[in-house]
Structures are given as C-alpha cells and as structure tokens.
Amino acid sequence: MSSFLRGAIARRVLVAAAALPLAWLASSAHAESQWGSGQNLYNKLCGYCHKPEVGVGPVLEGRGLPEAYIRAVVRSGFNAMPAFPASYVDDESISQVAEYLSSLPPPAAKP
C-alpha cells in the first residue's frame, strides 16, 4: 500500500474519530426537551385551550391520562385540536407534559 493511500486513510479515520463524539453530543443534547419542562410546554402551548379557567378544550390537569394517549392526540390531533409534528413538539417534551399533568390535582368542581 502506498504511503499516500495510508495517509489518506489515516486522515479519514482521524476525521471520523473526531466527528463521531461531536455528533453524539449533538444528538444527546437534542434528546432533551426543546421546551425545557412539561410545565413550560403546558403553559406556553397547551394551556391556551386546556387550562380549566379557559374552557376551550377539555381539562387535562389531574386526569391521569396515559402518555401514549397524550402522544397519539398530540401527533394526530382530535376534533378542533390540531396535530403537532415532532419538529414542533418532540417526544421528550410530550413525556414531560404527561408527567406534569399527572402531578396536578384535578380542578375544583364548579358549584
């Protein structure tokens, strides 16, 4: 094998060895919620329709809805609710909002 070919292969291996950890870091950073927390997502997006005092969509707080159900409705939409693609609301954020909603008590019944 010529020294030129060995040098070219060595450079490619070196570039790949440097690039892979950076790609892994970028993907793991993106795996974190793009909204910061379930509470933040709920307040900045979901709450405009689903907070009890708003009265537009069904109340979600304290209902113990399964994450899979929340994910399906967020991705597909339902009745007047639009669908939200993963590019807008990532899966980690949906998990966090489901956890946040299940931590809330049910709203007080109206007299």
Image (tube, grey):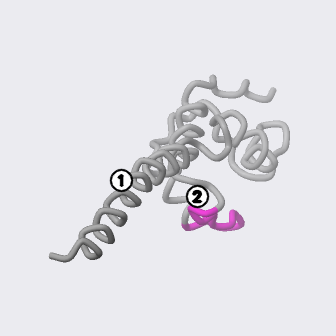
Which disc number belongs to residue 74? 2
* x, y percent for residue 29: 54, 44
**Label 2 close to label 1 by CB (< 8 Å):** no
Q: Quadrant of the C terminus?
A: top right
Dominant secondary structure (helix, strand or loop) of the stretch shown in magenta: loop
Q: Residue at x 48, y 45 (%)?
A: 25
**Does 1 sit left or right of 82 as displayed?**
left
Furthest-front residue in this view: 3
Gap between marks 2 and 1, in whole Å? 39 Å
Tally the numbered discs.
2
Q: Residue at x 72, y 37 (%)?
A: 40
Note whether 74 is above or below 64 in the view shown: below
**Does 92 sit left or right of 111 as displayed?**
left
Depth check: 35 or 72 in front? 35
Amino acid under disc 2: Val
* x, y percent for residue 109: 73, 27
Q: Is residue 6 magenta?
A: no
**Does 63 sit left or right of 57 as displayed?**
left
Give the secondary structure at mark 1. helix
Q: Badge 1: few (under 14), some or many (20 or more) residues near its Cα, within 10 Å? A: few
Q: Quadrant of the N terminus?
A: bottom left
Furthest-left residue in this view: 1
Depth check: 70 or 45 in front? 45
Q: Residue at x 73, y 52 (%)?
A: 57
Magenta span covers which residues?
A: 76-87
Q: In this figure, which residue is indicated by the disc labeled 1?
A: 17
